[in-house]
């Protein structure tokens, strides 16, 4: 073997410069170095003791297993390449094998439909170009090579961007061939609320779809909803194969997405769990914080019922920390506890008068909760909502449906910095909401204890802050007053873990979130785990589902071995994330023009009259056509450790 560390990483993607070896990850896990890596963009090696010929064998064997077989040259080519490399490593190779390998690799890359075939041969071609002597040395020695230790995973730009790493190309492909039922099976391995997520996910997958580099990304969320809708329409029951029943039980605090995901995945492993929920229905903030026009309550309740069908009991109206304590749970025989409480409290505006108790002043969290309960929490004609996220969009759109005719949204930056879903912003504008940018609240004005107006500052944008967005700066002397009947701040939410678990029992941050391990979801107490908003602060539903899924695996580890530790696959996932799977400036080798699927929506003048669902489902023909746009951008990652 040539005693030289080297890299070809980044040399294959048009528009990207090759990345120097010093800039590539060198650590795999804590106190465990990364020796070498092979993947979709080439390879790099830090430790020269790694036998790259053997690693190429292992990598191509992984490619052979992952080849779906739909492309004839890919299926046979990966089999042949794997067999040739295996023969070389067994000491049975001949020099002409290398020419055969190179010919097969180029054939597979040129003819494969998906990126398994288009990218898997890349590191092999790099080795044949730059380290051919390594292969010839092995061939000439006629000595078998000991197999090394490698960790492999298959990912894709969309899959990597999804917090729960749903195998998106797989379920999209199953929809393409008309098997929505199989697509749902794939989805539920990593996302137990497909009908919910198919409606309200913030779609990080779509913003990392390589199809954007051609025309427009795949409508991944819409396709997920399509599969869930088809199951409902067919009246089929989900196929569940829970593991053998175990004799240990788990307490789960909170029936939001994180708690439901934890219970579901524990149930699939055979463990009984009990969820303690302060509300009177499942879903947490998804139930009382997302209006029915975006997420019909029946969809959420129906998918939560599938968790209960696995043996989970949900006890409603119980406030852990008050009605039942951590010590009570221990005495009742629960062997582990998962904390999945959401961010139910509103953040402060730091605006004069917000704590005065004025009538018609209400936080966005309370406003949406009361709307969800069927109330008209505040009345009037003109309302001001402060904020730029999805909660603020939900508030202004709900206000239109409650009869407010003059609905105003104030945001201290510009539309470009607004964190809300662009679709929500557009639909709010269509519904008649007036947006006021570069404006911040200063003082609430009231008469006889009731809101009558809001004094505001005009802002300008300064240098970027920690979020990367330009910091809003007050323009002195540019104050003005907006007359209004009601004010609803929706600038953020906070967690209150300290009211659920005693701070002396678990480690809690100054933001009142639970300190957890980013991989295992464990806390400083071996039997307590946490995830979702209570650990990260307010985040997304899919991130909460991912946390519950990961915690269930760690809880099983704890219940069977007394401890929970990350697995090698977890470290490889983190490594893949560091490398980055989606390259937004990639120059695609072809162009196309195929419009993205957009589901039907109610007309604005109709939708503001009720809380009926705004977005509709799509027909099978439309879903199949959209699924056919997928480029199947699979990538194989392999690490030598």
Image: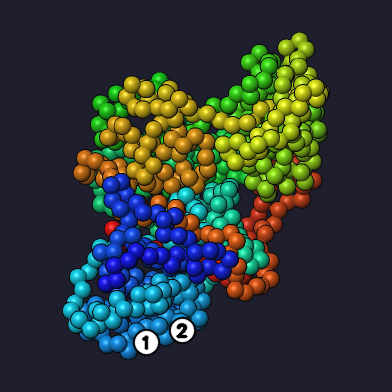
Secondary structure, mark 2, is helix
The quadrant of the rendering that contains the C terminus is bottom left
| Rendered image quadrant of residue 117 | bottom left
| Rendered image quadrant of residue 425 | top right
| Rendered image quadrant of residue 253 | top left
Give the residue at x 60% y 45%: 295
Q: Position of residue 291 (x, y in %)?
A: 63, 39
In the image, residue 488 above or below residue 634: above
Toward the viewer: 21 or 355?
Answer: 21
Toward the viewer: 57 or 134?
Answer: 134
In the image, residue 443 above or below residue 33: above
In the image, residue 43 above or below residue 513: below
The crowd level at tag 2 (other Cα within 10 Å; few <14, some 14-19, many 20+) is some
The crowd level at tag 1 (other Cα within 10 Å; few <14, some 14-19, many 20+) is few
Give the residue at x 49% y 34%: 537
User: Which residue is identified by label 2?
Assistant: 107
Secondary structure, mark 1, is helix
Looking at marks 1 and 2 on the same chain, the residue that comes earlier in the sequence is marked by 1
User: Which residue is identified by label 1?
Assistant: 100
């Amino acid at each position: 073997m040539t005693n030289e560390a080297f890299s070809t990483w980044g040399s294959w993607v048009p528009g990207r410069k090759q990345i120097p070896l010093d800039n590539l990850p060198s650590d795999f896990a804590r106190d465990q170095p990364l020796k070498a890596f092979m993947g979709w963009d080439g390879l790099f090696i830090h430790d020269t003791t790694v036998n790259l010929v053997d690693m190429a064998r292992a990598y191509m064997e992984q490619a052979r297993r992952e080849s779906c077989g739909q492309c004839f040259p890919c299926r046979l080519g990966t089999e042949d390449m794997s067999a040739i490399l295996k023969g070389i490593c067994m000491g049975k190779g001949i020099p002409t094998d290398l020419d055969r390998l190179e010919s097969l690799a180029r054939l597979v890359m040129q003819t494969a439909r998906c990126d398994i075939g288009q990218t898997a041969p890349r590191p092999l071609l790099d080795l044949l170009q730059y380290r051919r002597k390594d292969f010839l040395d092995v061939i000439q020695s006629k000595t078998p090579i000991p197999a090394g230790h490698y960790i492999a995973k298959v990912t894709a730009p969309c899959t990597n961007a999804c917090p729960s790493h749903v195998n998106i190309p797989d379920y999209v492909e199953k929809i393409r061939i008309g098997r929505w039922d199989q697509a749902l099976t794939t989805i539920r391995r990593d996302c137990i609320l497909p009908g919910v997520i198919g409606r309200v996910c913030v779609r990080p997958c779509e913003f990392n779809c390589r199809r954007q580099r051609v025309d427009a990304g795949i409508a991944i969320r819409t396709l997920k909803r399509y599969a869930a809708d088809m199951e409902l329409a067919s009246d089929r029951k989900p196929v569940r194969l829970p593991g053998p029943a175990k004799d240990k039980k788990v307490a789960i605090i909170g029936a939001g997405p994180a708690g439901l995901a934890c219970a579901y995945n524990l149930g699939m492993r055979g463990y009984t769990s009990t969820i303690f929920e302060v509300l009177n229905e499942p879903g947490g903030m998804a139930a009382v914080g997302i209006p029915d026009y975006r997420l019909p309550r029946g969809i959420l309740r129906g998918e939560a019922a599938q968790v209960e069908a696995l043996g989970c009991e949900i006890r409603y109206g119980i406030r852990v920390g008050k009605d039942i304590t951590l010590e009570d749970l221990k005495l009742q025989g629960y062997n582990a506890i998962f904390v999945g409480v959401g961010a139910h409290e509103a953040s402060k505006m730091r605006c004069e008068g917000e704590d005065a108790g004025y009538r018609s002043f209400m936080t966005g969290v309370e406003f949406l909760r009361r709307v969800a309960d069927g109330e008209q929490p505040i009345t009037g004609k003109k309302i001001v909502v402060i904020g730029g996220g999805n909660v603020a969009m939900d508030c202004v759109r709900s206000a239109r449906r409650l009869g407010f005719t003059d609905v105003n949204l104030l945001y201290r930056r510009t539309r470009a910095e607004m964190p809300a879903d662009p679709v929500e912003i557009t639909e709010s504008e269509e519904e008649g909401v007036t947006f006021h940018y570069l404006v911040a609240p200063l003082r609430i004005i009231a008469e006889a204890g009731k809101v009558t107006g809001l004094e505001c500052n005009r802002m300008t944008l300064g240098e970027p802050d920690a979020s990367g967005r330009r910091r809003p700066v007050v323009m002195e002397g540019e104050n003005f007053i907006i007359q209004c009947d009601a004010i609803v701040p929706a600038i953020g939410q906070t967690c209150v873990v300290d009211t659920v678990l005693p701070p002396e029992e678990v480690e809690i941050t100054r933001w009142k979130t639970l300190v957890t391990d980013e991989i295992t979801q464990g806390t400083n107490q071996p039997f307590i785990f946490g995830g979702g908003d209570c650990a990260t602060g307010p985040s997304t539903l899919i991130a909460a589902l991912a946390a519950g899924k990961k915690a269930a695996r760690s809880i099983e580890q704890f219940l069977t071995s007394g401890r929970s530790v990350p697995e090698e696959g977890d470290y490889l996932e983190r490594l893949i994330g560091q490398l980055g799977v989606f390259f937004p400036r990639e120059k695609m080798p072809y162009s196309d023009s195929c419009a993205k699927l957009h589901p039907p929506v109610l007309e604005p003048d109709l939708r503001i009259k009720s809380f009926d669902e705004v977005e509709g489902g799509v027909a099978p023909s439309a879903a199949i056509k959209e699924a056919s746009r997928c480029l199947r951008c699979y990538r194989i990652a392999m690490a030598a450790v």
